[in-house]
Image (cartoon, rainbow, N blue to C red):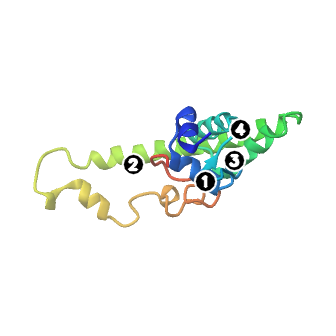
């Protein structure tokens, strides 16, 4: 099938399919005599699996592992369970970081309770204070959200 048909069946974009193929999450497509990509219908399920993993904020490394386990259906799923348990740990840590961030923002918001000139704004003054905020939750300094372990700060999902 052509790439557009695969994209429609898998509920994703053509660009997403090209990206996953480039990243090795999908096997290279066959080519027709006219040099068009020709995809096997079995890739619909694979693409749905990848999309659902992305919706669960899994990294490409984690998705590759899941796909590898899927490609070996007679293996024991103990490693899949361990991978998900590990991912749950990352999610738990991220939730704690976000709760801490929320607390800091609430505290900051409480610094300005009335309309006034911005030169008097408690929020701006608070943001200018040195060491006002806990840097252990600063995404530029926090290793697992800066990409060292493959996780990203919360942001819109890309393909």
Q: Which residue is mark 1?
A: 34
61 horizontally vs 3: left or right = right
Q: Quadrant of the N terminus?
A: top right
Mark 2 or 4 closer to N-term? 4
Whether residue 159 is visible to the viewer of this picture, yes or no, is no
**In the image, which is nearer the foreground, mark 1 or mark 3?**
1
What percent of the width, then of the height, locates residue 62?
A: 69, 47
Q: Secondary structure at mark 2?
A: helix
Which residue is found at the position 56% from the left and 32% from the top? 9
Secondary element at tag 1: loop
The residue indicated by pointer 2 is 104
- As drawn, the label of residue 78 is none
Which secondary structure, mark 3? helix
The numbered dot on residue 62 is 3
Q: Nearer the viewer, mark 2 or mark 1?
A: 1
- Residue 154, given in percent of the width and then of the height, sits at 48, 48
Question: Residues under labels 4 and 3: Cα distance?
Answer: 9 Å
Q: Earlier in the sequence, mark 1 or mark 3?
A: 1
- The residue located at (48%, 60%) in the rendering is 135
Residue at numbered disc 4: 84
Q: Quadrant of residue 110?
A: top left
Separation of residues labelled 2 and 4 (CA atoms):
30 Å
| Secondary structure of the residue carrying numbered label 4 | helix
Give percent across and percent down for residue 24. Answer: 69, 54
Q: x and y percent of residue 142 in the render?
A: 55, 59
In the rendered structure, which disc, 2 or 3, sits on the residue that comes first in sequence?
Answer: 3
């Amino acid at each position: 099938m052509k790439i557009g048909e695969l994209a429609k069946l898998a509920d994703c974009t053509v660009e997403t399919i090209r990206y996953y193929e480039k990243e090795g999450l999908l096997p290279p497509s066959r080519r027709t005599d006219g040099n068009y990509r020709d995809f096997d219908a079995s890739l619909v399920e694979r693409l749905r699996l990848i999309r659902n993993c992305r919706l669960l904020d899994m990294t490409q490394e984690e998705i590759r592992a899941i796909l590898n386990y899927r490609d070996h259906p007679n293996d024991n799923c103990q490693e899949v369970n361990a991978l998900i348990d590990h991912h749950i740990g990352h999610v738990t840590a991220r939730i704690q970081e976000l709760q801490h961030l929320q607390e800091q923002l609430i505290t900051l918001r409480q610094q300005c309770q009335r309309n006034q000139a911005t030169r008097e704004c408690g929020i701006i003054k608070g943001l200018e204070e040195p060491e006002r905020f806990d840097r252990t939750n600063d995404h530029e300094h926090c290793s697992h959200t800066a990409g060292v372990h493959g996780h990203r700060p919360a942001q819109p999902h890309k393909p």
